[in-house]
Image (spheres, rainbow, N blue to C red):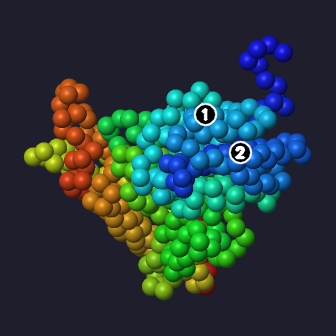
């Protein structure tokens, strides 16, 4: 065989990489390796945790590249990362800063820029150990399906290594990542659940109902520079996607305008936000005009939603509901997180004639001083409404 060419049997394919704070070193890296054959390796150089289709090898080191070298030193196969789907960082490590690791990963020719970045509320190693699908035996396919689910719910957003790296490098906005955890966690890995939350107000692991352990991606992890500073819930993520003009569709419950104790379900199938930024006396003034297109999913006996009066009432309730959440999101990201994850900087930069004047303005630090004006206009499609049931 030609020099530098490896056959499939000589390669160990990594499908996910987990990063944790190390015990004896700065870093603990867990490699989930797909094992297509029945032969699963375990060497004395590291720990190993088996599944029906993959094995997890863990090394402690001072850098990512050293970790890969250590893994290669005791595996009989050469590590190959061209099929890696997920890069998982624990909250503990992310709060300390992950910029150096992101740059190292981006500089590695085998790690594809399409790898998803996920921040785990439990340890990354524990996340990987419990990322076993009850449906699919191939771990790489399972990770792909987990990411694609965000298109159907809008509870999270698929963020890649390329996305995170660009956000970390530019001056228009702040980085963020997928927020994940494991359902059915025990107290040794993360705190208890909160069953009183509304369904869209959950973040990852909070919707746990004591079911079988399984990974859950719900919400977003927000960064200021390269450090984790907070998280967005499922509903806050929907709001984020609407304001960022990346929203696809979602089902949302709002308080019923006809009965205070009930909710009505709305399917939002289109949402557009017209954003603008002015600089008034050196302070950002941000306007967001949101337009929603929706249809009604829930109904009740003796209800008549087809009248113009009732249709208008539902639209007004929807406007108030989303306006409140939009204002909460805007002030949470600016005042609490001080992180422009919505990339309003792209609207502000047009007021500066040169790159130097933009850099001197220091948008990422000025964003916390912003004040906002938001409006919401919703349109309920009458063709989906039921006639009076009585």
Quarter of the rendering containing residue 211: bottom right
The residue singled out by tag 2 in the image is: 45
**Residue at the far top in the pictured view:** 2
Q: Is label 1 in a helix, a strand or a loop?
A: loop
Which residue is under mark 1? 111
Q: Tell which tag, 2 or 1, sits nearer the viewer.
A: 2
Q: Position of residue 9 (x, y in %)?
A: 84, 31
Location of the N terminus by quadrant is top right
Q: Is residue 108 above or below residue 126?
A: above
Above or below, 55 against 153 in this view is above
Mark 2 crowdedness (10 Å alpha carbons): few <14, some 14-19, many ≥20 = some
Which residue lies at the image location 16% right of the left edge and 48% below the top edge? 283
Q: Is residue 346 visible?
A: no
Q: Earlier in the sequence, mark 2 or mark 1?
A: 2
Tell me: residue 311, above or below residue 96. below
Quadrant in which the C terminus appears: bottom right
Q: Is residue 291 shown left or right of residue 252? A: left
Q: Give the Cα separation between the discs numbered 2 and 1.
A: 23 Å
Q: Dot 2 lies on which element?
A: loop
Residue 183 in percent (x, y) is at 64, 68
263 left or right, relative to 168: right
Residues at marks 2 and 1 touching, judged by CB atoms closer than 8 Å: no
Q: Position of residue 358 (x, y in %)?
A: 21, 33
Q: Nearer the viewer, residue 49 or 175?
A: 49
Residue 48 is tagged as none
Left or right of 121 on screen, residue 232: left
**Residue in front for this viewpoint, 306 or 201:** 201
Residue at 48% x, 58% y: name it: 92
């Amino acid at each position: 065989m030609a020099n530098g060419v490896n056959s499939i049997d000589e390669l160990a394919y990594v499908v996910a990489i987990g990063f944790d704070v190390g015990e004896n070193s700065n870093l603990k890296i867990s490699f989930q390796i797909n094992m297509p054959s029945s032969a699963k390796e375990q060497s004395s150089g590291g720990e190993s945790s088996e599944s029906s289709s993959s094995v997890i090898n863990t090394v402690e080191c001072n850098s990512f590249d050293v970790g890969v070298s250590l893994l290669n030193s005791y595996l009989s196969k050469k590590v190959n990362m061209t099929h890696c789907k997920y890069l998982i960082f624990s909250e503990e490590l992310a709060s300390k800063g992950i910029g150096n690791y992101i740059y190292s990963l981006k500089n590695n020719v085998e790690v594809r820029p399409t790898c998803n970045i996920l921040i785990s509320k439990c340890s990354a190693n524990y996340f990987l150990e419990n990322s076993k699908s009850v449906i699919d035996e191939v771990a790489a396919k399972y990770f792909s399906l987990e990411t694609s689910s965000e298109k159907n719910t809008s509870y999270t957003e698929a963020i890649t290594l390329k996305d995170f790296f660009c956000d970390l490098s530019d001056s228009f906005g702040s980085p963020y990542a997928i927020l994940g955890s494991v359902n059915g966690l025990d107290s040794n890995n993360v705190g208890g659940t909160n069953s009183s939350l509304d369904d869209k107000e959950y973040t990852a692991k909070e919707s746990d109902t004591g079911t079988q352990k399984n990974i859950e991606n719900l919400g977003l992890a927000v960064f200021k520079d390269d450090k984790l500073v907070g998280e967005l819930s499922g509903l806050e993520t929907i709001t984020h996607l609407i304001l960022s003009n990346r929203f696809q569709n979602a089902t949302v419950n709002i308080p019923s305008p006809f009965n205070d104790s009930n909710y009505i379900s709305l399917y939002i199938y289109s949402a557009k936000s017209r954003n603008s930024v002015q600089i008034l006396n050196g302070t950002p003034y941000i306007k967001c005009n949101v337009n929603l297109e929706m249809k009604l999913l829930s109904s009740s006996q003796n209800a008549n939603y087809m009248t113009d009066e009732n249709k208008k009432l539902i639209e007004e309730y929807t406007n108030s509901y989303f306006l409140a959440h939009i204002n909460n999101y805007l002030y949470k990201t600016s005042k609490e997180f001080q992180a422009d994850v919505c990339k309003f900087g792209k609207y502000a930069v047009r007021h500066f004639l040169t790159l130097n004047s933009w850099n001197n303005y220091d948008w990422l630090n000025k964003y916390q001083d912003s004040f906002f004006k938001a409006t919401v206009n919703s349109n309920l499609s009458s063709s989906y409404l039921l006639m009076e049931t009585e």
